[in-house]
């Protein structure tokens, strides 16, 4: 049984590869830049690109199971090639936004293509990643010991990236997950204020929280570049999941705790990592 991992150099895909290697199953990865993939030596890396389905043919020989990174534009053709090559199981990295009907044109079409293929499928639907805090707040924490945010009391339950990878690996390796869509959140509701405090505890120093306007936060994110700049309008509520204009104040009023406990990885793996664990895991990444 060979498992193909697409998106293998990404934040979740790389962790899925590591878990499959530890399980001692044959793993193959695709990358647009195999020479710089940085994956374990025992993992063959084949050149391929999900936006170019023709490039995948050589990677599919003998593959029985696939971890699928979402690319909506080519999903139907890509999954068709999986089926033609003899793939039996696909585990899709999706999004919790599908669950609430907010995502209709990015992750949902990938799920639909997989389900229509006749292959055995499992969807992994994480909510907001705890990693977002590293990408958004990391620069100012490292440089100034401060977080600038417009919504200090907005409440969410972000998920640890390792929980997402654990569930994806379980669905690839184990039976009993077919036809399931696993929505994944963190095990507790936390305000931005709570999260900043917990990061400070992990670092052993106080991290100051400074409230700014959404407009000021957008300026800061855009100046940072990278993930923060690319996603500033969505993260701050200036646009919705589909890119339509939205009111940032609605994002600020967000309090998911009104919905009661949300699903976590515990139902699949027996554990769900807390934000405090995540902060300790990434403490060195948040230090100057």
Image (cartoon, grey):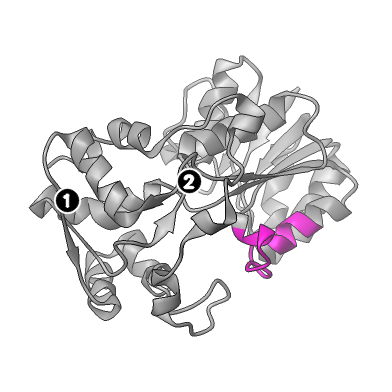
Between 125 and 121, the one lying in front of the other is 125
Say if residue 42 shows up in the picture.
yes
Please state the extent of the stretch shown in magenta in the rendering.
97-112
Instruction: Decide whether residue 101 is among the magenta residues.
Output: yes
Q: Which residue is mark 1?
A: 141
Frontmost of labels 1 and 2 is 1
Q: Which residue is mark 2?
A: 33
Instruction: Decide whether residue 92 is among the magenta residues.
Output: no
Can you name the residue that lies furthest to the bottom here? 245
In the rendered image, the vertical position of residue 43 relative to residue 53, given as above or below? above
- Element carrying mark 2: loop
Residue 228: which quarter of the image? Answer: bottom left
Residue 72: which quarter of the image? Answer: bottom right
In the rendered image, the vertical position of residue 87 relative to residue 78, given as above or below? above
Q: Position of residue 175 (x, y in %)?
A: 79, 25
Q: Position of residue 77 (x, y in %)?
A: 78, 58
Q: Is residue 125 left or right of residue 221?
A: right
- Element carrying mark 1: helix
Q: Position of residue 21 (x, y in %)?
A: 56, 20
Quadrant in which the N terminus appears: top right
Quadrant in which the C terminus appears: top left
Give yes or no for contact between labels 1 and 2 (Cβ–Cβ under 8 Å): no
State which tag comes first along the sequence, 1 or 2: 2
Between 69 and 246, the one lying in front of the other is 246
Q: Position of residue 107 (x, y in %)?
A: 65, 60
Between 257 and 107, the one lying in front of the other is 257
Q: Is residue 118 left or right of residue 151?
A: right
Can you name the residue that lies furthest to the right here? 118
């Amino acid at each position: 049984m060979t498992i193909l991992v697409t998106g293998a150099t990404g934040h979740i895909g790389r962790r899925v590869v590591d878990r499959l290697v530890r399980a001692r199953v044959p793993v193959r990865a695709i990358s647009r830049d195999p020479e710089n993939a940085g994956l374990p030596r025992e993992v063959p890396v084949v050149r391929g690109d999900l936006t170019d389905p023709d490039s995948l043919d050589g990677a599919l020989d003998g593959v029985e199971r696939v971890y699928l990174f979402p690319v909506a534009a080519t999903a139907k053709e890509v999954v068709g090639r999986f089926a033609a090559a003899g793939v039996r199981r696909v585990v899709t990295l999706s999004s919790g936004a599908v669950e609430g009907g907010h995502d209709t044109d990015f992750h949902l079409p990938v799920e639909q293509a997989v389900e229509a293929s006749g292959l055995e499928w499992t969807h992994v639907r994480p909510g907001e990643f705890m990693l977002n805090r590293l990408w958004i707040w990391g620069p100012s924490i490292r440089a100034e010991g401060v977080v600038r945010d417009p919504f200090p009391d907005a409440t969410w339950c972000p998920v640890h990236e390792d929980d997402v990878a654990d569930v994806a690996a379980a669905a690839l390796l184990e039976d009993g997950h077919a036809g399931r869509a696993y929505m994944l959140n963190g095990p507790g509701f936390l305000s931005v204020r709570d999260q900043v405090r917990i990061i400070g505890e992990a670092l052993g120093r106080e991290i100051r929280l400074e409230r700014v306007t959404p407009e000021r936060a957008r300026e800061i994110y855009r100046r940072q570049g990278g993930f923060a700049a690319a996603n500033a309008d969505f993260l701050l509520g200036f646009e919705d999941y589909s890119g339509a204009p939205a009111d940032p104040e609605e994002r600020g009023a967000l309090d998911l705790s009104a919905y009661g406990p949300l699903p976590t990885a515990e139902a699949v793996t027996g554990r769900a990592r807390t934000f405090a664990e995540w902060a300790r895991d990434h403490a060195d990444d948040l230090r100057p």
